Amino acid sequence: MRESKKGAFITFEGTEGAGKTTQIERIKTFLEASGIDFITTREPGGTLLGEKIRSLLLQDEMAQMTELLLMFAARAEHIAKVILPAINSGKWVLCDRFTESSYAYQGYARGISLEAISTLESLVQGELRPDCTFWFDIPVLEGMKRVQSRGDKDRFEAENITFFEKVSAGFQTLAQERSNQFYRVDALQSKDDVTASILLHLKGLINRYAG
């Protein structure tokens, strides 16, 4: 079991346009009011090196395996420099995307071996896994409509509907396989209803890790 002095590791997953960013901001407000010490971060990114890798990943065309390895290179730096130090100091970590996105995007959608991703997961993370993953489940077409309204799209956002259907199916499979970790959020609800659903589950986590 995790020592009580350590913080919780919370991740947020979903296809494009699911509303993760909006809800993370609301969760931050709630945790501040609850007296929880936390940090927010994202993947790819989270460190100076990670943000440089993020820029390459979102803009430059590359081989699929290059994409996967860059994701995990950024993740290795992120874990070593940000995530583990925060958790070990007692802070909660809210991370916008983590390895589950690598399975969904590079594995289920790009077709890279899930076994290869699992090997990298073990190599880079050791025993580190999210304590809870909020999965924002939204129909692909609705998510794409939301992305269209943003204007310019990055390399991932510009993918076609078939790609995102595979991503969505990947998250569904992961949610079944990692049922103790995943918490499904119906992202079609109003923003307030989505927040209420998340906070209801989050209060249980607070009792578990900060109680």
Image (cartoon, helix red, strand yellow):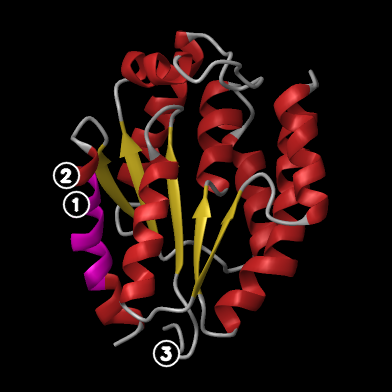
Amino acid beneath label 3? Ser
Q: Position of residue 142 (x, y in %)?
A: 32, 17
Q: How far apart are marks 1 and 3 (CA)?
A: 25 Å
Amino acid beneath label 2? Asp
Classified by dominant secondary structure, the portion drawn in magenta counts as helix
Identity of the residue drawn at 82% across and 42% down = 52
Left or right, 76 with respect to 24, comes to: right
Q: What element carries label 1?
A: helix
| 30 or 163, nearer to the observer | 30
Q: Is residue 203 magenta?
A: yes
- Kindly identify which numbered label has been placed on residue 197: 1
Q: How far apart are marks 2 and 1 (CA)?
A: 6 Å
Magenta stretch bounds: 194-204
- Kindly identify which numbered label has been placed on residue 193: 2
Left or right, 211 with respect to 154, comes to: left
Identity of the residue drawn at 41% across and 52% down = 24
Q: How far apart are marks 3 and 2 (CA)?
A: 31 Å
